[in-house]
Image (cartoon, grey):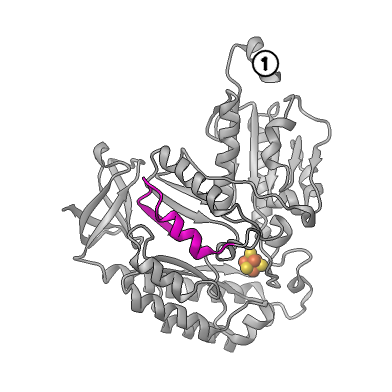
């Protein structure tokens, strides 16, 4: 109603701009919020453009993520002080009151209310004080389905939310609540919708996706077997999955599936068993090494990305060296290195044996160097091979790029006919920008 009145008054479409911080899950949710507004006649514009309403989808995984949210709001306020500003997402849930005090914010939506934004934003008048729509995280039961569309060749499909683990450094369960999911039937319906939009590749996303089925009495392997049958989707990537939940059966399923790609992303966090126990992770390094070995036995050319945290409280030089040597010994392709940062109200925040910032930076640098070596080695192993690439839409200085099934980046001269197409290529050599030069087969 309000929208129609505004439209008559201005004779122009109202504009919405979104800014997403954090993970793939947030991207899938921002995209879903944007579609809700678009179906009501709003026009989505880039964040850098003038809009009537701005939505910041926040993250709170580190202190820096909180800072980025505050910076984004300040930027909006500076460029367009009259626009309505809503902040949703993890920071909004964990510390909604702090977010509400950021100058320029009109409304803050916690995890249960972010998909009701359109209902609540009934008038785009700026508020003197930000309105806070939130509830206790323990009361959150509902699963809101989401997938991304519009901005990329691949779609991020949310299959799970929340986490029942209690890793001592992690704030995410306080931001996203308990582990929950849609049932397989409804998840398949979402994947079919993604296929109808013309996407060929889906990245399965969630907080702890291996825990899929906790709220519906199903399990992850049944989900991926069902997804494998969806017409139109030719590729799936499983995003980050806990090593204890990445069973041999899942690896074997991926190995025989034509659609699930040889690409794994597994959090290790530390290669020292005492630190893993202090983190309350649910595996030790022997289990982790077993999963890597199983992947490499069944899918020798698989890409394996590994998350690792440096500077966890109490991590000594010797503990760090354990992590370094362990990772060096494993056949992994890339390291995502995170510097430990205190999150409020987590068990580790009150630990006293913190590692100095300079030491964290030194350890981070060492692991980034190791990652570089591993990544280059993985690329070099693929020179001369034939692979299938899905080409992306973006054009950059006359070039386009795409990714092979095992996540090697390729680059070639832009050709519109290749966009969103799967094509066989020959991997010729590695260019200076770390992508492959290719020849179409
Ligand atoms: S598994 Fe641990 S690190 Fe991952 S979201 Fe759950 S609590 Fe956080």
- Which residue is located at x 63 percent, y 58 percent? 216
Is 231 magenta? The answer is yes
Q: Quadrant of residue 417?
A: top left
Q: Secondary structure at mark 1?
A: helix
Instruction: Give, as a single range, the part of the protein colored magenta.
Output: 218-238
Point out residue 299 in the picture as x, y percentages from the top left corner. 33, 72
- Work out whether 51 lies above or below 13: below
Residue under label 1: 6
- Which residue is located at x 45 percent, y 76 percent? 248
Point out residue 53 in the picture as x, y percentages from the top left corner. 65, 30
Nearer to me, 400 or 301: 301
| Ligand 1 location (quadrant) | bottom right
For disc 1, the neighbor class at 10 Å (few under 14, some 14 to 19, many from 20) is some
Q: Is residue 355 visible?
A: no
Point out residue 286 in the picture as x, y percentages from the top left corner. 51, 86
User: Where is the N terminus found, in terms of image quarters?
Assistant: top right
Left or right position of 231 against 239 = left
């Amino acid at each position: 109603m309000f929208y129609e009145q505004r439209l008559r008054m201005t004779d122009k479409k109202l504009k919405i701009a979104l800014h997403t911080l954090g993970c793939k899950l947030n991207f899938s949710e921002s995209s879903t919020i944007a579609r809700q507004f678009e179906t009501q006649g709003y026009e989505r514009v880039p964040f850098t453009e003038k809009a009537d309403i701005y939505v910041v989808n926040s993250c709170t995984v580190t202190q820096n993520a909180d800072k980025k949210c505050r910076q984004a709001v300040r930027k909006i306020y500076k460029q367009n002080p009259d626009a309505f500003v809503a902040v949703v997402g993890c920071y909004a849930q964990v510390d909604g009151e702090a977010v509400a005090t950021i100058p320029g914010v009109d409304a803050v939506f916690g995890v249960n209310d972010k998909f009701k934004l359109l209902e609540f934003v009934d008038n785009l008048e700026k508020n003197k004080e930000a309105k806070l729509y939130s509830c206790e995280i323990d009361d959150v039961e509902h699963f809101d389905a989401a997938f991304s569309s519009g901005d990329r060749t691949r779609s991020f499909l949310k299959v799970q939310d929340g986490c029942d683990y209690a890793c001592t450094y992690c704030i995410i369960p306080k931001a996203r609540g308990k582990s929950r999911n849609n049932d397989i039937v409804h998840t398949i319906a979402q994947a079919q919708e993604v296929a109808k939009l013309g996407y060929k590749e889906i990245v399965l996303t969630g907080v702890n996706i291996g825990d899929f089925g906790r709220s519906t009495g199903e399990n992850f392997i049944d989900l991926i077997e069902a997804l494998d049958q969806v017409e139109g989707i030719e590729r799936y990537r499983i995003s980050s999955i806990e090593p204890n939940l990445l069973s041999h059966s899942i690896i074997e399923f991926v190995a025989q599936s034509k659609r699930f790609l040889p690409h794994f992303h597994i959090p290790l966090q530390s290669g020292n068993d005492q630190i893993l126990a202090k983190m309350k992770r649910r595996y030790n390094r022997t289990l982790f090494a077993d999963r890597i070995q199983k992947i490499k036995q069944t899918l020798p050319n698989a890409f394996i990305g590994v998350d690792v945290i440096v500077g966890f409280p109490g991590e000594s030089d010797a503990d760090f060296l354990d992590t370094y040597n362990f990772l060096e010994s494993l056949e992994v392709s890339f390291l995502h290195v995170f510097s430990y940062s205190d999150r409020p109200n987590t068990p580790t925040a009150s630990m006293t044996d913190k590692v100095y910032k300079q030491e964290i930076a030194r350890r981070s640098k060492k692991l980034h160097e190791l990652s570089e070596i591993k990544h280059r080695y993985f690329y070099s192993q693929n020179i001369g091979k034939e692979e299938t690439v899905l080409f992306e839409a973006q054009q950059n200085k006359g070039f386009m790029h795409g990714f092979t099934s095992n996540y090697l980046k390729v680059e070639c001269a832009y050709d519109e006919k290749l966009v969103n197409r799967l094509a066989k290529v020959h991997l010729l050599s590695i260019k200076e920008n770390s992508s492959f030069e290719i020849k179409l087969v």
